[in-house]
């Protein structure tokens, strides 16, 4: 019989806060957490940050993925667009989607404004027990 200790599953808010913390450890810039729970059912939070180069973007992603694996969390999907026309890596952790972008891509796609401008979906409601505000890692 295996006596394997398992960690309790993290909430989406706890997961997003860990991603922020680990990205900050890697000197990611302008880390933002978007609460999209009332706008879509595809995820609870987006964590978006900026890397200064393709190498920096990759280093941020690798460190965050490594630290989350330590918690038993692996991405469902990973998409990398680096080099010519790239500068954007996305990790889909199910309830949290992590975007690391170079500044040019971040300004062009402006995910923050897009999601902020979307109306709330009246068919989606927040669970009463879930905290509603991400923790500021500053």
Image (cartoon, rainbow, N blue to C red):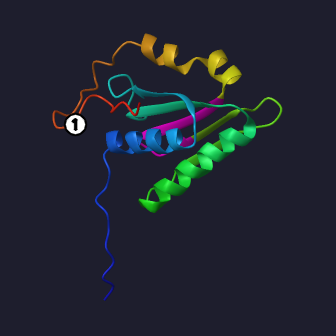
- State the residue in front, 52 or 2: 52
In this view, the residue farthest toward the bottom is 1
Residue 126, x across and y down, in percent:
24, 29
Q: Residue at x 57, y 51 (%)?
A: 63
State left or right for residue 135 relative to residue 68: left
Give the structural element (helix, strand or loop) at label 1: loop
Q: Residue at x 49, y 59 (%)?
A: 69
Quarter containing the N terminus: bottom left
- State the residue in front, 7 or 123: 7
State left or right for residue 131 relative to residue 114: left
Q: Residue at x 60, y 43 (%)?
A: 60
Residue 5, x across and y down, in percent:
31, 73
Residue 76 visible somewhere in the drawing: no
116 up-or-down from 75: above or below: above
State left or right for residue 138 relative to residue 133: right
Residue 11, x across and y down, in percent:
31, 46
Q: Decide whether the magenta segment is chiefly helix, strand or loop.
A: strand
Q: Residue at x 38, y 40 (%)?
A: 17
In this view, the residue farthest toward the left is 128
- Quarter of the figure with residue 18: top left
In this view, the residue farthest toward the right is 84
């Amino acid at each position: 019989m295996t006596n394997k200790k398992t960690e309790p599953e993290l909430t989406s808010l706890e997961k997003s806060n860990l991603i922020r913390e680990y990205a900050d450890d890697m000197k990611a810039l302008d880390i933002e957490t978007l609460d999209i729970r009332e706008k879509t059912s595809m995820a609870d939070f987006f964590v978006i940050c900026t890397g200064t180069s393709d190498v920096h973007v990759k280093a941020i992603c690798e460190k965050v993925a490594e630290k989350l694996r330590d918690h038993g969390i692996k991405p469902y999907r990973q998409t990398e667009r680096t080099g010519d026309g790239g500068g954007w890596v996305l990790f889909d952790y199910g309830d949290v989607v992590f975007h690391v972008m170079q500044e040019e891509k971040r300004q062009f796609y402006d995910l923050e404004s897009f999601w902020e401008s979307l109306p709330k979906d009246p068919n989606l409601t927040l669970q009463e027990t879930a905290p509603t505000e991400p923790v500021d890692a500053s």
